[in-house]
Image: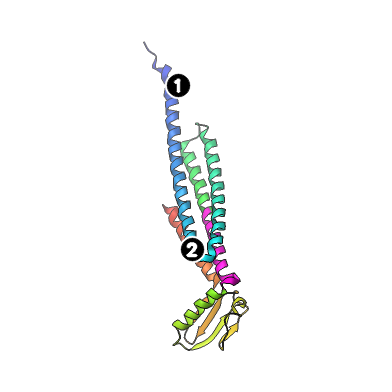
Amino acid sequence: MIDLEDFTPLVECIQASKEEEDKEAFYQKQLLALREQFQKELERVRREAYRKGFEEGVKKASAELEKRFSKELNQVKRSYEERLSSLSVNIDSLVEELNGSLSQVQNNFLEAVSEALVELLSFLYIDPSNAPFVKEKLQELLEEFKDEPLLTVEVGKGLAEHVTGEFVKVNPELGDNDFRVKFKEFTVESSLREKINLVRDELKREAKKAAQV
């Protein structure tokens, strides 16, 4: 009579192998999702850099993002492989830890994108070579509201030599390439800090959406 208990080691080996394959498939799925997210956010950075003068900034920001992404990804991979080497690790615990690591990578990545966008916005409004561009936008604004009574045009120090006129005065509290136009009924202001805060708020909203998926 055949003793079925003799096959117990073989059955356990097959089960362990199947469990390892399931873990590997789950890990590959997580990595693909992370890579897709990276490509999506990187493309968003490129779209933000719409001006020709931003090409160098995009290359620098892209290289930095790729470097940080690769580093974070390798850390997750090493951590996963160490746990995968021991089949005694509980699969639920492993999944929970992996999700936590991926969540941390996501947060770090979004922070890197935020920093890159801040750098690009700073380049647009602070770099002296962009003063003529800001002047052009200011002139378009004045033309659009030419029928409104104009009180003052306050400009930062960087715009002072490019924008002159009866209503123009330098405001040292403004950024170099910022301006504030006061009409009788309303005020229009270009503020770097305000734009950076808007970008950061948008990134936070996107992060919450991603966390809920």
Q: Is residue 50 above or below residue 172?
A: above
What's the residue at 46%, 57% (across, down)? 43
Where in the figure is residue 117, as x and y percent of width and height? 53, 62
What is the secondary structure assignment of the residue under circle 1? helix
Q: Which residue is mark 2?
A: 48
Q: Residues within 10 Å of mark 2 (few under 14, many from 20)?
A: few
- In the picture, measured across the screen, residue 164 lies left or right of residue 140, that is right
Most foreground residue, 65 or 128: 128
Amino acid type shown at disc 1: Pro
Residue bounds of the magenta highlight:
109-130
What's the residue at 42%, 26% (across, down)? 14
Image disc number at residue 54: none
Compute the Cα span from label 2 to label 1. Answer: 59 Å
Locate the N terminus and report the quarter of the image it occupies.
top left
Query: Can residue 197 be seen by looking at this rendering?
Result: yes
Image disc number at residue 9: 1
Where in the figure is residue 149, as x and y percent of width and height? 48, 89
Residue 212 forms part of the magenta stretch: no
